[in-house]
């Protein structure tokens, strides 16, 4: 784990590396997709949340 990534996780200032910037972009992209779904698209929303957070509890 890089020093910059450790700083990010610790809430300290960091200089974004390519990996950190890529993770940030993916999060924004998945959030945007989630926000574009409707209440009726439950399966798609569940999928996007799992991609965004890695794992979830029981989603009904």
Image (cartoon, helix red, strand yellow):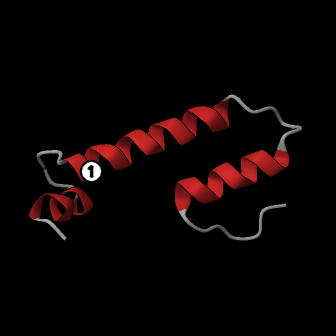
Indicate left or right for 29 with 8 as reference. Answer: right
Work out which quarter of the rendered image holds the N terminus and state it. Answer: bottom left
Image quarter for residue 10?
bottom left
Q: Which residue is drawn at the image coordinates 74% and 46% (left, top)?
A: 45
Indicate left or right for 44 with 53 as reference. Answer: right
Q: Which residue is drawn at the image coordinates 55% and 41% (left, top)?
A: 30
Residues packed near mark 1 inside 10 Å, few (<14), some (14 to 19) or many (20 plus): some
Picture coordinates of residue 37 (x, y %)?
Answer: 75, 33
Q: Count of labels shown?
A: 1
Decide: is 30 above or below 3. above
Decide: is 52 above or below 37. below
Q: Which residue is drawn at the image coordinates 89% and 38% (left, top)?
A: 40
Q: Which residue is drawn at the image coordinates 64% and 53% (left, top)?
A: 49
Indicate left or right for 33 with 37 as reference. Answer: left
Work out which quarter of the rendered image holds the C terminus and state it. Answer: bottom right
Picture coordinates of residue 48 (x, y %)?
Answer: 65, 49
Picture coordinates of residue 23 (x, y %)?
Answer: 36, 49
Q: What element carries label 1?
A: helix
Picture coordinates of residue 12 (x, y %)?
Answer: 15, 54
Decide: is 29 above or below 50. above
Most foreground residue, 60 or 23: 23
Pointer 1: what residue?
20
């Amino acid at each position: 784990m890089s020093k910059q990534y450790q700083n990010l996780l610790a809430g300290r200032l960091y200089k974004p590396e390519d990996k950190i910037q890529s993770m940030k972009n993916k999060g924004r992209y998945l959030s945007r997709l989630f926000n574009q779904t409707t209440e009726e698209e439950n399966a798609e929303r569940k999928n996007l949340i799992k991609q965004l957070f890695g794992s979830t509890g029981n989603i009904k």
